[in-house]
Amino acid sequence: MGTIKKKYDLFSPTFKANPFPTFAQMRQGDPIYAHHSPNGGTIWYITRFAEVTAVLKDNDHFVKDFRNTLPPGAKQPRKSSMHRLINENMLFADPPDHTRLRALVNQAFTPRRVEQLAPRVQQITDALLDGIAAAGQADLIADFALPMPVRIIAELLGIPAEDQAEVADWSQAIISPGSRNLNYSARKKKVRAFVAYLQEMFALRQKNPQDDLITALVQAEEAGERLNEAELSSMVALLLVTGHETTVNLLGNGALALLTHPEQLAILRENGGWETAVEELLRFDGPVETSTTRWVREDFTFEGHQMRRGDVVRVVLASANRDGCHFAQPNALDVTRRDNRHLAFGMGIHYCLGAPLARLEGQIGLQTLFDRFPKLKLAVPTVQLEWRSGVLFRGLKALPIVFG
């Protein structure tokens, strides 16, 4: 397994505020680091670009469905309604299930559908900024970065405007119950309400199809296969959650990076180039810190480290994107950076389906914000900003700003 040279702080608020020095230490000394959890399991943190890409492309040894780590004939764990809602989708599936699910959803989530959204993304952006302009100050997360992508993905799916706030609340209960102070029973109640709502929506769309993503998913067919009801519910939940969580953090982290690097913001204001800039913001401080969990399918040796069946593997995208072996001056924000093959949206068969939509929202949202408010600045020192807990997403709890 190799000697663990030192213990790393991977969970404290201090670490979350700036994890990059710790990741640099890990890349240098423990690029494949075994963290032994209190329950006796092992979690492997993979931090270098080369090894991260190797894991992301290796679907034989590293699986997304834990059941594929069980020995032949082992009893399958019973799945709760909550587990099914969260896990019966392509994000937590391996081939051939993943291949079938992805093919079905690809039909509904076409580049053409995303391109057609640009005017609507601009409208929603303008309306939200109109709403906060008069106050002269705002929390950029609560007032802009969160409602913008929530509204977009809800409209894309076909969720009526009057239901969007409740649906967003349900999806938050799934992804981050801790931040809502929900106990298990309160969370379960919300999940059940969400499933009942979706079942009603699927029945309506079967009788009365609309030009929306839920209709497209209900109708999607590939070689005679359709999504069953559990897969439909889980897929809509996945699209709702990932369809806004990534963009919230792209907008928040991106705005903070530009406000703390005024010389880079000046380049954009003078020369444009927001498309290139968004790629650099995704690399520099992207919305996803570690990829979703993978498990080791069976005992094997990876880069000299003995991994055991059922071990957890976390690939640290935020670390790989600062790897000096792959990026020149990795800790510098350079909005004109051209050679920028970052991993903010992953790689391989699980590459983020919503990446084109997140990019579109990031470009329109950030450019409009900084064009609209040329004197925009932080309302508090950066040391007072609080980051969300958890290992998956990297984002701010709030971003207080003044318009100057």
Image (cartoon, grey):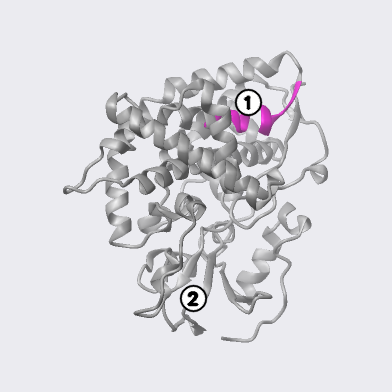
Q: Is 156 covered by the magenta stretch?
A: no
Residue 289: name its quadrant. Answer: bottom right
The Cα–Cα distance between marks 2 and 1, rounded to whole angstroms, is 47 Å
What is the x, y in percent for residue 263? 68, 36
What is the x, y in percent for residue 93? 38, 59
Residue drawn 30% across the image and 34% down it = 216
Residue drawn 69% across the image and 40% down it = 261
84 vs 252: above or below: below
Q: How many marks?
A: 2
Residue 271: name its quadrant. Answer: top right
Q: Quadrant of the C terminus?
A: top right
Name the kind of residue labelled 1 in the image. Answer: Phe
Name the kind of residue labelled 2 in the image. Answer: Gly
What is the x, y in percent for residue 273? 50, 33
Q: Secondary structure at mark 2?
A: loop
Is 219 displayed left or right of 161 in the figure?
Answer: left
Mark number displayed over residue 310:
2
Mark number displayed over residue 370:
1
Q: Residues within 10 Å of mark 1 (few under 14, many from 20)?
A: some
Q: Magenta segment, which residues? A: 137-149
User: Does residue 334 appear in this view?
Assistant: no
Q: Is 148 covered by the magenta stretch?
A: yes
Residue drawn 49% across the image and 82% down it = 308
First in sequence: mark 2 or mark 1? Answer: 2
Between 204 and 331, which is closer to the camera in this rendering? 204
Q: Which secondary structure type mostly characterizes the magenta part of the structure?
A: helix
Q: Quadrant of the N terminus?
A: bottom right
User: Does residue 13 appear in this view?
Assistant: yes
